[in-house]
Amino acid sequence: MDYRVSIVDDNASDREYIAALVKRWAKEAGHTVSLSAFPSAEAVLFAYEDSRSDMLLLDIEMGGLNGIELAKEVRQKDGAVQLVFITGYPDFIAEGYEVSALHYLMKPVSYKKLYTVLDKAAANLAKEEKRLCVVYDRTTDFVPLSQIFYLEAQKQYVMIHAADRSYRKKGSLAEMEKELDEYFFKCQRSFLVNLRYVVRVKKDCVVLRDGTEVPISRGMAEKIGKEIIRLF
Protein backbone atom coordinates (compact mmCIF):
# COMPACT_ATOMS: atom_id res chain seq x y z
CA MET A 1 0.00 0.00 0.00
CA ASP A 2 1.00 3.58 -0.56
CA TYR A 3 0.50 5.98 2.37
CA ARG A 4 0.89 9.73 2.75
CA VAL A 5 2.44 10.41 6.16
CA SER A 6 2.99 13.85 7.68
CA ILE A 7 5.18 14.53 10.69
CA VAL A 8 4.63 17.73 12.66
CA ASP A 9 7.21 18.76 15.26
CA ASP A 10 9.00 22.03 15.95
CA ASN A 11 12.17 20.09 16.81
CA ALA A 12 14.13 19.24 13.66
CA SER A 13 15.97 16.31 15.28
CA ASP A 14 12.69 14.74 16.40
CA ARG A 15 11.22 15.16 12.90
CA GLU A 16 14.21 13.42 11.33
CA TYR A 17 14.16 10.62 13.90
CA ILE A 18 10.45 9.87 13.40
CA ALA A 19 10.84 10.07 9.61
CA ALA A 20 13.61 7.46 9.75
CA LEU A 21 11.40 5.14 11.82
CA VAL A 22 8.47 5.55 9.44
CA LYS A 23 10.69 4.72 6.44
CA ARG A 24 11.96 1.62 8.22
CA TRP A 25 8.40 0.52 9.05
CA ALA A 26 7.29 0.98 5.43
CA LYS A 27 10.23 -1.00 4.08
CA GLU A 28 9.76 -3.90 6.50
CA ALA A 29 5.96 -3.98 6.05
CA GLY A 30 6.14 -3.79 2.26
CA HIS A 31 4.49 -0.37 1.97
CA THR A 32 5.56 2.80 0.21
CA VAL A 33 5.25 6.18 1.93
CA SER A 34 5.20 9.76 0.75
CA LEU A 35 6.65 11.69 3.70
CA SER A 36 6.09 15.33 4.52
CA ALA A 37 7.61 17.11 7.53
CA PHE A 38 6.36 20.37 9.03
CA PRO A 39 7.92 22.58 11.74
CA SER A 40 4.58 23.98 12.93
CA ALA A 41 0.84 23.40 13.02
CA GLU A 42 0.31 26.55 10.95
CA ALA A 43 2.49 25.15 8.16
CA VAL A 44 0.32 22.01 8.01
CA LEU A 45 -2.93 23.95 7.76
CA PHE A 46 -1.52 26.14 5.01
CA ALA A 47 -0.66 23.09 2.88
CA TYR A 48 -3.36 20.63 3.94
CA GLU A 49 -5.92 21.21 1.19
CA ASP A 50 -3.29 20.43 -1.42
CA SER A 51 -1.50 17.62 0.44
CA ARG A 52 -3.84 15.65 2.65
CA SER A 53 -2.39 12.86 4.76
CA ASP A 54 -3.41 9.30 5.55
CA MET A 55 -1.46 9.43 8.82
CA LEU A 56 -0.59 12.54 10.81
CA LEU A 57 2.09 12.17 13.52
CA LEU A 58 1.82 15.20 15.79
CA ASP A 59 3.86 16.75 18.53
CA ILE A 60 1.62 18.56 21.04
CA GLU A 61 3.66 21.33 22.63
CA MET A 62 4.69 23.65 19.81
CA GLY A 63 4.98 27.40 19.54
CA GLY A 64 1.76 28.96 18.27
CA LEU A 65 -1.02 26.45 17.53
CA ASN A 66 -0.47 23.23 19.49
CA GLY A 67 -0.97 19.68 18.26
CA ILE A 68 -4.42 19.26 19.85
CA GLU A 69 -5.69 22.44 18.22
CA LEU A 70 -4.25 21.34 14.89
CA ALA A 71 -5.92 17.93 15.21
CA LYS A 72 -9.30 19.57 15.80
CA GLU A 73 -8.90 21.69 12.66
CA VAL A 74 -7.82 18.73 10.55
CA ARG A 75 -10.54 16.42 11.87
CA GLN A 76 -13.21 18.88 10.72
CA LYS A 77 -11.88 18.54 7.18
CA ASP A 78 -10.92 14.87 7.18
CA GLY A 79 -12.69 12.12 9.08
CA ALA A 80 -10.43 9.31 7.88
CA VAL A 81 -6.94 10.60 8.71
CA GLN A 82 -5.19 8.57 11.41
CA LEU A 83 -4.00 10.93 14.17
CA VAL A 84 -1.09 9.86 16.37
CA PHE A 85 0.27 12.17 19.07
CA ILE A 86 3.95 11.91 19.86
CA THR A 87 4.74 13.99 22.92
CA GLY A 88 6.75 14.39 26.04
CA TYR A 89 3.67 15.47 28.01
CA PRO A 90 0.87 13.09 29.12
CA ASP A 91 -1.46 15.91 30.25
CA PHE A 92 -3.42 16.18 27.01
CA ILE A 93 -4.56 12.55 26.65
CA ALA A 94 -8.20 13.28 27.55
CA GLU A 95 -8.42 15.95 24.85
CA GLY A 96 -7.19 13.46 22.28
CA TYR A 97 -10.41 11.50 22.56
CA GLU A 98 -12.29 14.53 21.23
CA VAL A 99 -10.53 14.18 17.88
CA SER A 100 -10.60 10.35 17.76
CA ALA A 101 -6.83 10.08 18.08
CA LEU A 102 -5.53 6.60 17.33
CA HIS A 103 -2.82 6.61 19.99
CA TYR A 104 -0.46 8.58 22.22
CA LEU A 105 3.24 7.79 22.14
CA MET A 106 5.61 9.24 24.69
CA LYS A 107 9.01 10.59 23.70
CA PRO A 108 11.51 9.14 23.16
CA VAL A 109 9.54 6.84 20.82
CA SER A 110 10.68 3.26 20.47
CA TYR A 111 10.58 1.65 17.04
CA LYS A 112 8.58 -1.32 18.32
CA LYS A 113 5.78 0.86 19.72
CA LEU A 114 5.61 3.08 16.65
CA TYR A 115 5.60 0.01 14.38
CA THR A 116 2.56 -1.37 16.23
CA VAL A 117 0.67 1.94 15.98
CA LEU A 118 1.45 2.38 12.28
CA ASP A 119 0.26 -1.18 11.61
CA LYS A 120 -3.01 -0.35 13.35
CA ALA A 121 -3.37 2.87 11.37
CA ALA A 122 -2.81 0.98 8.12
CA ALA A 123 -5.41 -1.61 9.11
CA ASN A 124 -7.95 1.13 9.88
CA LEU A 125 -7.34 2.79 6.52
CA ALA A 126 -7.76 -0.54 4.73
CA LYS A 127 -11.15 -1.05 6.38
CA GLU A 128 -12.34 2.36 5.22
CA GLU A 129 -10.95 2.14 1.70
CA LYS A 130 -13.42 1.86 -1.13
CA ARG A 131 -13.22 -1.38 -3.11
CA LEU A 132 -14.38 -2.46 -6.54
CA CYS A 133 -16.54 -5.59 -6.55
CA VAL A 134 -15.47 -7.92 -9.37
CA VAL A 135 -17.64 -10.96 -10.07
CA TYR A 136 -16.35 -13.41 -12.67
CA ASP A 137 -16.54 -17.20 -13.11
CA ARG A 138 -18.60 -17.57 -9.91
CA THR A 139 -15.88 -15.82 -7.91
CA THR A 140 -16.20 -12.47 -6.16
CA ASP A 141 -13.17 -10.30 -5.45
CA PHE A 142 -13.11 -6.92 -3.69
CA VAL A 143 -10.21 -4.96 -5.14
CA PRO A 144 -9.00 -1.83 -3.25
CA LEU A 145 -9.10 1.17 -5.58
CA SER A 146 -5.61 2.21 -4.52
CA GLN A 147 -4.29 -1.13 -5.83
CA ILE A 148 -5.70 -0.67 -9.35
CA PHE A 149 -3.19 0.69 -11.90
CA TYR A 150 -5.55 1.14 -14.86
CA LEU A 151 -8.69 -0.21 -16.53
CA GLU A 152 -8.97 -1.23 -20.17
CA ALA A 153 -12.16 -1.73 -22.18
CA GLN A 154 -12.26 -4.94 -24.24
CA LYS A 155 -15.54 -5.36 -26.09
CA GLN A 156 -18.18 -6.33 -23.51
CA TYR A 157 -15.60 -6.66 -20.73
CA VAL A 158 -13.27 -4.39 -18.75
CA MET A 159 -9.79 -5.57 -17.77
CA ILE A 160 -8.82 -4.30 -14.32
CA HIS A 161 -5.03 -4.25 -13.99
CA ALA A 162 -4.09 -4.25 -10.30
CA ALA A 163 -0.87 -4.55 -8.33
CA ASP A 164 -1.19 -8.28 -7.70
CA ARG A 165 -3.03 -9.49 -10.84
CA SER A 166 -5.50 -8.55 -13.56
CA TYR A 167 -9.26 -9.10 -13.31
CA ARG A 168 -11.95 -9.24 -15.99
CA LYS A 169 -15.41 -7.87 -15.33
CA LYS A 170 -18.38 -7.80 -17.68
CA GLY A 171 -19.64 -4.27 -18.37
CA SER A 172 -18.62 -0.97 -19.91
CA LEU A 173 -15.89 1.45 -18.94
CA ALA A 174 -18.53 4.14 -18.38
CA GLU A 175 -20.37 1.93 -15.88
CA MET A 176 -17.12 1.10 -14.07
CA GLU A 177 -16.08 4.75 -13.87
CA LYS A 178 -19.06 5.49 -11.59
CA GLU A 179 -17.64 3.08 -8.99
CA LEU A 180 -14.19 4.66 -8.89
CA ASP A 181 -12.77 7.67 -7.03
CA GLU A 182 -11.39 11.00 -8.22
CA TYR A 183 -7.91 9.59 -8.84
CA PHE A 184 -9.08 7.73 -11.94
CA PHE A 185 -8.83 9.69 -15.19
CA LYS A 186 -10.22 8.75 -18.59
CA CYS A 187 -7.10 9.29 -20.66
CA GLN A 188 -8.39 7.62 -23.80
CA ARG A 189 -11.67 6.14 -25.03
CA SER A 190 -10.70 2.65 -23.88
CA PHE A 191 -8.56 3.47 -20.82
CA LEU A 192 -8.98 4.81 -17.28
CA VAL A 193 -5.71 5.37 -15.42
CA ASN A 194 -5.12 5.67 -11.68
CA LEU A 195 -3.17 8.92 -11.29
CA ARG A 196 -1.67 7.62 -8.04
CA TYR A 197 0.69 5.52 -10.17
CA VAL A 198 1.63 7.95 -12.96
CA VAL A 199 5.30 8.90 -12.85
CA ARG A 200 5.69 10.46 -16.32
CA VAL A 201 3.40 12.04 -18.89
CA LYS A 202 4.37 11.82 -22.57
CA LYS A 203 2.53 13.23 -25.57
CA ASP A 204 1.03 9.83 -26.48
CA CYS A 205 1.02 7.88 -23.18
CA VAL A 206 1.50 7.97 -19.42
CA VAL A 207 4.17 5.86 -17.75
CA LEU A 208 3.19 4.06 -14.55
CA ARG A 209 5.37 3.22 -11.57
CA ASP A 210 5.97 -0.33 -12.82
CA GLY A 211 7.00 0.88 -16.29
CA THR A 212 3.67 0.19 -18.00
CA GLU A 213 2.76 2.67 -20.72
CA VAL A 214 -0.95 3.51 -21.02
CA PRO A 215 -2.02 5.30 -24.24
CA ILE A 216 -3.66 8.72 -24.04
CA SER A 217 -5.67 10.73 -26.54
CA ARG A 218 -4.17 13.55 -28.60
CA GLY A 219 -3.90 16.75 -26.55
CA MET A 220 -4.59 14.95 -23.26
CA ALA A 221 -1.08 15.27 -21.75
CA GLU A 222 -1.59 18.82 -20.45
CA LYS A 223 -4.97 17.96 -18.87
CA ILE A 224 -3.47 14.96 -17.10
CA GLY A 225 -0.57 17.05 -15.81
CA LYS A 226 -2.92 19.66 -14.38
CA GLU A 227 -5.06 16.99 -12.72
CA ILE A 228 -2.03 15.39 -11.07
CA ILE A 229 -0.96 18.80 -9.71
CA ARG A 230 -4.49 19.39 -8.37
CA LEU A 231 -4.69 16.05 -6.59
CA PHE A 232 -1.17 15.80 -5.23
Image (cartoon, helix red, strand yellow):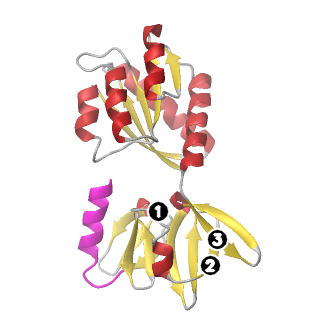
The residue located at (68%, 65%) in the rendering is 141
Q: Identify the amino acid type marked 1.
A: Arg
Read off the residue under disc 3: 134
Q: Tell me, for residue 175, which label it has, or none.
A: none
Residue 93: image x %, image y %? Answer: 48, 14
Read off the residue under disc 1: 209
In the image, residue 223 lies in the stretch drawn in magenta: yes
Residue 87: image x %, image y %? Answer: 44, 15
- Within-10-Å neighbours for mark 1: few <14, some 14–19, many 20+: few
**In-front residue for pair 128/154:** 128
The residue located at (29%, 64%) in the rendering is 227
**In-front residue for pair 94/84:** 94
Decide: is 92 above or below 46: above
Q: Which residues are magenta?
A: 216-232
Q: Secondary structure at mark 2?
A: strand
Task: List the single residue furthest toward the right.
Answer: 138
* Labels 2 and 3: the sequence-earlier one: 3
Read off the residue under disc 2: 169
